[in-house]
Image: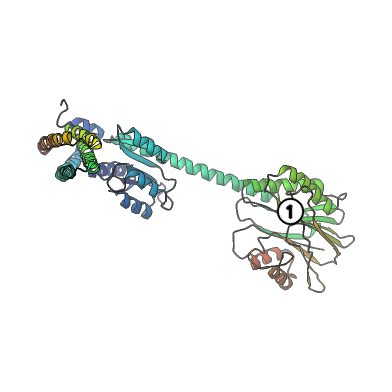
Amino acid sequence: MTGFHQSRVLVVDDERTNLRLLSMVLRQEGHLVDSAPDGPSALEAAAANLPDIVLLDIMMPGMDGFETLGRLRGVEGCRGIPVIFLTGLEDLESKLRGFAMGAVDYVVKPFHLEEIRARVRIHLQLRIAHRELAEERGRRLRSLGRAQREMMIRPEEIPDARFSVHYRPAQEAGGDLYDVLPLGVGIHGYMVADVSGHDVGTSLVATAAKALLHQFAGPIYSPEETMRLMNEALHGWLQPGRFLTANFVRLNRNTGMVRAVSAGHPAPLLLEAASGKVVPLASEGDVLGAFPDARFGKVERAVRTGDRVVIYTDGLVEGEGRRPGGIGAGLEAALSEIGACPLEELPARLADKLAGTSRDDDVLVLAFEA
Amino acid sequence: MDLPVLDKEASLVRLDGDTELWNEIREIWLEDIQNLLGAVRTALEARSSDGLRRAAHAIKGASANVGAVRMAAVAREMEHAAMDADWEALGAAMRTLSAETDSARTALSAR
């Protein structure tokens, strides 16, 4: 790159002196100029080299300027390109019709070169400003995503919980979230959730869900009560159509008991260290936030030291045929095969094996060991 | 008609005083005017209101650019008369346009 961007201007006029004048003045300004003597060649030129701005004569034989503009909007990439109409001084009706069709400006014939320069310049600047605005929005979404990731607890911050996690958001601010928190001495809670939708609102819901989890999780609440209270709070607050699916698992290392609650989420898997068997902690349940009196599935069972539990979002098992009960058969097989690898590698290896390189959905896998 | 045959100064103002560029469009005008005039004549004979309007529009544009202001004015009147399909007036305008073309050609060739 040369460090500056040369704008490409497409000039469309059936009148030769107009075409010559416009091409000349715009080239002198340092623009790249394509010229077309009629509508069909203009559409071809636009498709071959996407212009930054189009100067379009209204009155042309055959396809006139209005029709050309209408068709130009259908050319790939040309929807948002500014179009300046070239028109006669007295032709008010054409000007109004041009604006109604989305032209950004008009230049009156016969041309004044200074005016051409000024109008093209201002509309190119506006276009750049628009683009920067769109990029700024993208940046804000990215920083929100960063904030979200920074809010996610790392395994080394809470070593007693003995977990590891792999999180790959499909978009800048993802709708998947996890949290790990101490619920008492030797007791930890592990949550994985998936917020419906993929937009800025999704991230806000994810952030709110974590705040609620911290409010309602603790020694005095059972995991079901935590989910029920979260559901009540979310139901009063979420917009219709928004909801979360979630797993919340409590592991009590003092008693060797694991208790899993499911809210419309794929079942957690338990890998028994001694036998190598994979056991789904199957539980159905309503989603979070959609119904005032949601019911959640729950499973409780004994675990031994070294047993592992894997919780995940459906980005991991999407695309593979699911067996009844919402468990990915491929995930069970993968866990049997590589489940004994170092705990810190397990989530990423499962994600590599199953989700591959698909970027369609967030992928989140969390594993912890009893 | 009070307008001059050729107002080169007004044209040059619009072209930033670029005489070289003015010369270029003058040459294009001299090359094209016979065809443009032919298109007007054909449309008039065919009584094609639409064709006549477009042909007169093209002459108006080319002539205005080069500063042939009287020619542009006549073409503009023809363009409007074509919309009303006033064939009697258009026949007379055609004769005026032919005469103006000769004057403009003479003025522009002299440069």
Residue A7 showing in the rendered view: no
Q: Is residue A180 left or right of residue A170?
A: right
- Percent across and percent down for residue B6 are 15, 32
Q: Is residue B86 above or below residue A156?
A: above
- Percent across and percent down for residue B71 are 17, 34
- Percent across and percent down for residue A300 are 85, 62
Total count of labels: 1
Q: Residue at x 56, y 44 (%)?
A: A137
Give the chain of mark 1.
A
Q: Residues within 10 Å of mark 1 (few under 14, many from 20)?
A: some
Q: Secondary structure at mark 1?
A: loop
- Percent across and percent down for residue A156 are 75, 56
Q: Is residue A57 left or right of residue A153?
A: left
Q: Amino acid at mark 1?
A: Val
State which quadrant residue A215 falls in.
Answer: top right
Q: Is residue A357 above or below residue A241?
A: below
Q: How is the image coloured?
A: rainbow
Name, please, the residue furthest toward the right: A255
Front-most of residues A297 and A308 = A297
State which quadrant residue A246 falls in.
Answer: bottom right
Q: Residue at x 52, y 44 (%)?
A: A134
Q: Quadrant of the C terminus of chain A?
A: bottom right
User: Which residue is labeled 1 in the image?
Assistant: A287
